[in-house]
Image (cartoon, grey):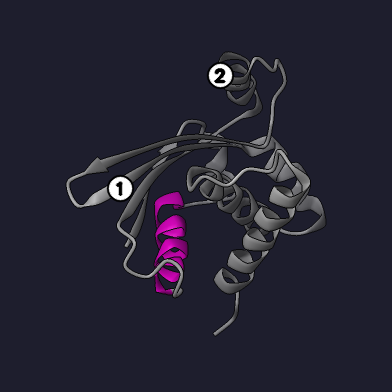
Amino acid sequence: MIKANIVLDKKIWKKKLEEPEIYFKKKLSKLSKLSTFKNKNQEFTVMLTNNKKMKDLNSKFRNKNVSTDVLSFPLKVKLKKKLYLGDIAISFEIINRRSKSSSFDHELDKMWIHGYLHLLGHDHKKDKDYYLMKRKENLIFKKLNKIN
């Protein structure tokens, strides 16, 4: 089973996501049933924060003094029978702004999936890697949001 530890850094998230832990648990339970992710004992942390914190993190770890939508910090450490993949941070303001043309859940799913793929080792520095990662993101997104 894939597990996410949720850190609610900013309470503003509660306006759109009443119970973040349950939201992610449902999504990851569905992800764990997909053949690619079946029998994966993985764990990671998602910090739900704001633009100010994202700017601080981006500045500290990437020398970019701007806010961003999602940051991933891969770690890959074996903890008992689980593989701890690392941490993901997501900005409320950016997700909320983008959700005006879709939905909050839609934008949030896109961001944590993107961050999760970074934790698995994917990147988008080269065009071919960008397209491969984008294809995987879209595939996971579609399967997670498929109505059964």
Quarter of the rendering containing residue 146: bottom right
Q: Residue at x 62, y 51 (%)?
A: 108
Query: How far apart are labels 2 and 1 at the CA level?
Result: 23 Å
Q: Earlier in the sequence, mark 2 or mark 1?
A: 2
Give the residue type that dot 2 points to. Phe
Magenta-tinted stretch:
19-33
Residue position marked by numbered label 1 in the rendering: 83
| Horizontal side, residue 27 vs residue 108: left or right | left
Name the quadrant of the C terminus: bottom right
Q: Residue at x 52, y 31 (%)?
A: 10
Is any atom of residue 114 visible in this view? Answer: yes
- Of residues 118 and 112, the one nearer the viewer is 118
Q: Residue at x 70, y 15 (%)?
A: 65
Quarter of the rendering containing residue 37: bottom left
Quarter of the rendering containing residue 139: bottom right
Is any atom of residue 5 visible in this view? Answer: no
**Relative vertical location of residue 24 with respect to residue 79 in this rendering, above or below:** below
Name the quadrant of the N terminus: bottom left
Q: Which mark is residue 61?
A: 2
**Relative vertical location of residue 141 with respect to residue 108 in this rendering, above or below:** below
Residue 105: give x, y in percent of width and height. 62, 57
Question: What count of labels does the image hold?
Answer: 2
- Of residues 120 and 67, the one nearer the viewer is 120
Residue 89: give x, y in percent of width and height. 53, 35
Q: Determine whether the residue tagged by mark 1 lies in a helix, strand or loop.
A: strand
| Most common secondary structure along the magenta stretch | helix
Q: Residue at x 67, y 64 (%)?
A: 138
